Amino acid sequence: TMSEGLTFQPDSVKVSVNGEEITSGYTLVTNSEDGCTFEIKFADGTLKPNDVVTVTYAAVLNDKAVIADAGNPNRTHLSYKDTNGATRETIPSETRTYTWKIDVFKYTMKGETETPLADAEFVLYKEVNGEKQYAQAADGKITGWTSDKNAATIFKTPANGTFTISGLDSGAYYLEETTAPAGYNILKDPIKIEITYSIDSNTNVGTATVKYG
């Protein structure tokens, strides 16, 4: 059962028995009556005693994903019948997917006062195998990545000079100013942003550390 911050990808499901992928002998059921995101139901005779079954699948974070905090849980369990025909269930196993955010504040110093600057425009990118991948976002939340800079989302500062980008994994990113506010020079170099994190083993609460520059 996935939390609402995760979107299940039905086409990603693969089932293997003893290391060999099978494409029949089971049924994939989504949004089952008991509230599970999906179920794999094996037909009688598909499995033998001591068979090792591996199910792999994928999900993506969506706009309801929890940022940091206790993450986005996904719980799995197995139901089976014993030799007497009684239904048994394993203890549920749970994983948590965490995602993070960065806060950006564009300003100029007037004396000792930080004065916000509007209308600065930025793109965010990461490097994957030496190639720049530019962020695409909706309402400040990551929706995907593209190698086409022209298709990148432009993040523009409002009057208070601030914006947030959420839905990021840990790792290194680069914030590149593409348009400077009127009367100001554009930043010469992108700002490197590094996200690291830790998880409290007692509370499952994740905390990110964001290093700028």
Image (tube, rainbow, N blue to C red):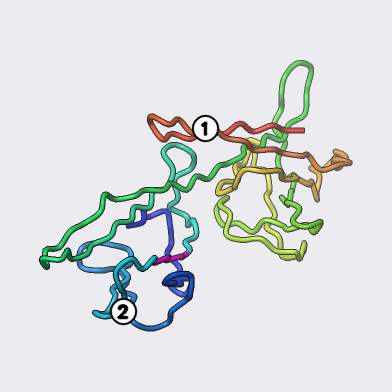
Q: Please name the residue that numbered disc 1 is placed on.
A: 207
The numbered dot on residue 96 is none
Q: How far from the left and from the top, in percent, is residue 75?
A: 34, 52
**Residue in the foreground of this view, choosing between 197 and 45:** 45
Task: State the residue lying farthest toward the front.
Answer: 50
| Quarter occupied by residue 201 | top left
In primary-sequence order, the first of circles 2 and 1 is 2
Amino acid residing under circle 2: Thr
| Residue that appears at 88% across and 40% down | 185
> In which quadrant will I find the N terminus?
bottom left
Residue 183: quadrant of the picture: top right
Q: Quadrant of the C terminus?
A: top right
Decide if residue 149 is on the left or right side of residue 205.
Answer: right
**Magenta residues, start to end:** 53-57
Residue 104 vertical position relative to residue 59 in the rendered view, above or below:
above
Residue hosting label 2: 46
Magenta-drawn stretch, dominant element (helix, strand or loop): strand
Query: Which residue is drawn at the image coordinates 79% and 17% (left, top)?
Result: 111
Taking depth in this image into account, of 176 and 145 the one nearest to the observer is 145
Q: Position of residue 147 (x, y in %)?
A: 75, 64
* Residue 181 position in % (x across, y down): 79, 42
Q: Say if 174 sits above or below 128 in the image.
A: above
Task: Residue at 76%, 66% (x, y): give it.
Answer: 148
Determine the residue located farthest toward the bottom in the rendered image: 24
Q: Amino acid at mark 1?
A: Thr
Q: CA distance from mark 2 to mark 1?
A: 44 Å
